[in-house]
Amino acid sequence: MMKNSDTSADLSASELITRRIAELGDWRGETLGKMRKLIKAADPEVVEEWKWMGTPVWSHDGIICTGESYKDKVKLTFAKGASLKDPAGLFNSSLDGNARRAIDIHEAEEVDGAAFKALIRAAVALNKSSVKPKPAKKSAS
């Protein structure tokens, strides 16, 4: 029987994200947990991943967003944010890049949940639309 160890290699991405939220233990963990719930509510088929030495990543046919925690903020970076309509103006960071856009959430700030879920759904739709179907054999015309 294998010995039960407590290394991150033995945990799923979802378990690692749950652990990160618990380890933060303050408003950042609470905020990341809230945003995670909104992501899962917006896209029940979302895939949680753990990349780049400890970054929570949410994907569906490609990366939707990452969730990093810093001393003064929680940052949700949308991989293709520059291509998304943001009618509620949630994006407030990384606004000059060609592809990414981010939402920085500071202590005591609330994010409009409905607008955030709409952004998640738009990111999933964009990812689905950019998934290339396998090319069918073309007949010469």
Image: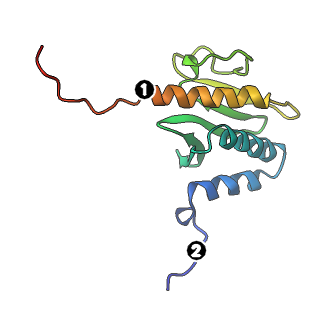
Residue contact at pointers 2 and 1, CB within 8 angstroms: no
Up/down of 6 relative to 47, above or below: below
Which disc, if any, is residue 22? none
Frontmost of labels 2 and 1 is: 1
Indicate the secondary structure of the residue bearing disc 2.
loop
Q: CA distance from mark 2 to mark 1?
A: 40 Å
Residue in the picture at 78% in, 32% down: 113
Q: Residues within 10 Å of mark 2 (few under 14, many from 20)?
A: few
The amino acid sitting under disc 2 is: Ser
Indicate the secondary structure of the residue bearing disc 1.
helix
Q: Position of residue 21 (x, y in %)?
A: 73, 51
Q: Earlier in the sequence, mark 2 or mark 1?
A: 2
Up/down of 89 relative to 69, above or below: above
Residue in the picture at 13% in, 22% down: 139
Q: Classify residue 139 as left or right of residue 1.
A: left
**Which residue, given by chain and number where applicable, does mark 1 sit on?**
130
In this view, the residue in front, 96 or 59, is 59
> Which quadrant is home to the C terminus?
top left
In this view, the residue in front, 137 or 117, is 137
Is residue 79 in view from this perspective? no
Q: Position of residue 57 (x, y in %)?
A: 58, 42
Q: Classify residue 99 as left or right of residue 28.
A: left
Q: Quadrant of residue 46?
A: top right
Residue in the picture at 59% in, 44% down: 55
**Which residue, given by chain and number where applicable, does mark 2 sit on?**
5
The amino acid sitting under disc 1 is: Ser
Q: Quadrant of residue 97?
A: top right
Residue in the picture at 70% in, 27% down: 103
Q: Position of residue 106 (x, y in %)?
A: 81, 31
Q: Quadrant of residue 109?
A: top right
Is residue 81 in view from this perspective? yes
Residue extending farthest to the right is 108
